[in-house]
Amino acid sequence: MGAERIVVGMSGGVDSSVAALLLKRAGYEVVGLFMKNWEEDDDDEYCSTRQDLIDCASVSDIIGIDLEVVNFAAEYKDRVFAEFLREYSAGRTPNPDVLCNAEIKFRAFLDHAIALGAARIATGHYAQVREVREAGNESRFELLRAGDGSKDQSYFLHRLDQGQLARTLFPLGRLRKTEVRRIAREAGLPNFAKRDSTGICFIGERPFREFLNRYVPRKPGIMRTPEGRAVGEHVGLAFYTIGQRKGIGLGGVKGAAEEAWYVAAKDMDRNELVVVQGHDHPLLLRRSLEARDLAWVSGGPPDGDAGYGAKTRYRQADAPCHVARIAPDGLDIEFDQPQWAVTPGQSVVLYNGEACLGGGVIQ
């Protein structure tokens, strides 16, 4: 028997490179897989695919592993991008990274890896998996937060299923980002200092509104206050998100206080954008939410009575909450403290201590 083959999803970044390096050092037969998920307008101005592939190839060469390139652009367009546009057109703000992980990075990728003769895959995500033995010697897998809380990516992975989780390794799960960069530098990897990619993968660094405008028609309408006073015109409800402050286009409004304006709500029926002044306006705060399209990554729904922590966006601390109602089609969550700018289309993700239970889409 030779060494176990593991296919590592490689992006050209330092995280996935070090994940591959650590597995190679641990004695596995490692194959790198570079996924090309977008090719509409893949030019160098905003899209870094070409440079990322060059970085992948040089890292693979140094580590001493084979690199495969696979094109998932058709699957991505069908399963992720089409849903992204549907949600924006309906006035919601989706999180394509969550969908991309469930549908492409762990589904299409896992299928491809199995075809390459691997039983397991690995990625450079900051998260951990724990196997839990149940009665009757059955196993269940739990998704846990990363050791480096500031880099934890379990929020984006909450839609994976038990089959995906059971076959995935996260070699960086216990490491801090500074250690990952140090390991890369000491191993002579050329991308040890490469900056992390931010934003949505298919948009890259390009201006978001300009990108969306190609696919979603502008439908201007009135911007009004909750009292019904018209204060301006919006370019189309799809182009705004709850809690948005920059880019609304409202400066000093005659007769209004000097406080900053925020997007508080969208009235889809009347094509009106509701705006308020002040970060802590009551319309920007919510004590409860409803979520649908549920996914329980760690094996099952939460117990309704217990207290949990919830994130309604990636970069936030857990908010203490409890589940007021749970059913197959949805759940209601009530927070101990009001939450700011809870946004329809984003994901709410529940935690029980270190374990990520799963979540759903905010309505």
Image: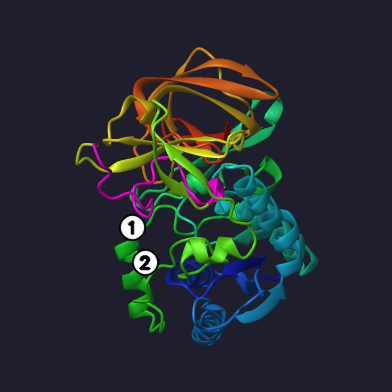
Q: Mark 1: which amino acid?
A: Arg
Residue 10 at least partly seen: yes
Depth check: give the residue in front, 283 or 190: 283
Residue 194 placement: quadrant:
bottom left
Q: Is residue 245 magenta?
A: yes
| Contact between labelled residues 1 and 2, with CB atoms less than 8 Å apart | yes
Location of mark 1 (residue): 176
**Quadrant where the image shows the N terminus:** bottom right
Depth check: give the residue in front, 44 or 108: 44
**Quadrant where the image shows the C terminus:** top right
For label 1, the crowd category at 10 Å Cα-Cα, with few meaning under 14, some 14 to 19 and many 20 or more, is some
Residue 243 placement: quadrant:
top left
Residue lying at the far left in this picture: please name it: 258
Residue lying at the far front in this picture: please name it: 254
Q: Going by the image, does 361 lie left or right of 154?
A: right
The residue shown at (64%, 24%) is 330
Location of mark 2 (residue): 180
Instruction: Identify the magenta region.
Output: 236-255
